[in-house]
Amino acid sequence: MAKTIALIAHDHKKEEIVIWATKNKEILKNYNLCGTGHTANLVKKATDLEVTTFLPGPLGGDQQIGAHIAEGKIDVVIFFWDPLETQPHDPDIKALLRIAVVYDIPIATNESTANLVIKGLANN
């Protein structure tokens, strides 16, 4: 069964994750993809890949992804977050990061780490 990768990006990082997903389209097409609201839709539009869309992060999307991690339904999180921008839903973001660590899920928070994670998946 294919692994599931969650794609998340803060507003100032959405363009970066779309560019990253486009560069890695050939690898990503082998996985089930999901993501929070606008990020999922942008990646879907740019790559023509199927991406299951959750709610936007501030409206519960981060919590939905966290719940799916706890249920064993998400294997990897690619989360391009903006450490320089205050987020109104910061507690949800911290909870998502915490649950990924608790369940030992790889979580990439920038392009360099995302590249390492995706290449590691591709080599397995």
Image (spheres, rainbow, N blue to C red):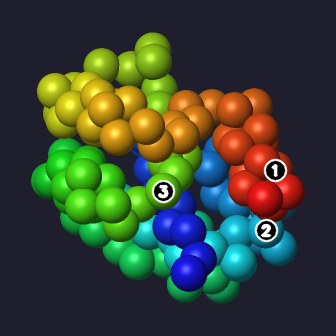
- Residue farthest to the top, as pictured: 84
What's under tag 3, amino acid-wise? Asp
> Which of the two labelled residues, at mark 2 and mark 3, occupies the earlier sequence position?
2
Q: How crowded is mark 3: few (under 14 residues within 10 Å), some or many (20 or more)?
A: some
Q: Which residue is the site of mark 3?
A: 75
Q: Nearer the viewer, residue 29 or 10?
A: 29
Q: Nearer the viewer, mark 2 or mark 3?
A: 3
Apparent side of residue 120 relative to residue 10 in the rendered image (left or right): right
Q: Residues within 10 Å of mark 1 (few under 14, many from 20)?
A: few
Residue under the image location 70 percent in, 60 percent down: 21
- Residue 99 appears at what percent x and percent y? 28, 37
Instruction: Name above or below for residue 11 compared with residue 18.
Output: above
What's under tag 2, amino acid-wise? Ile
Residue under the image location 56 percent in, 81 percent down: 1
**Whole-number angstrom distance, CA of label 2 to CA of label 3:** 15 Å
Instruction: Tell me whether the residue at label 2 lies in contact with that at label 3, contact meaning CB atoms closer than 8 angstroms.
Output: no
Tag 2, which secondary structure?
helix
Instruction: Name above or below for residue 94 compared with residue 18.
Output: above
Tag 3, which secondary structure?
loop
Instruction: Name above or below for residue 43 compared with residue 2.
Output: above
What's under tag 1, amino acid-wise? Lys
Q: Nearer the viewer, residue 34 or 123?
A: 123
Residue 44 visible in the displayed image:
no
- Residue 57 appears at what percent x and percent y? 26, 49
Q: Which residue is the site of mark 2?
A: 27
- Residue 48 appears at what percent x and percent y? 65, 84
Tag 1, which secondary structure?
helix
Q: Quadrant of residue 16?
A: top right
Q: Which residue is the site of mark 1?
A: 119
Instruction: Tell me whether the residue at label 2 lies in contact with that at label 1, contact meaning CB atoms closer than 8 angstroms.
Output: yes
> Which of the two labelled residues, at mark 1 and mark 3, occupies the earlier sequence position?
3
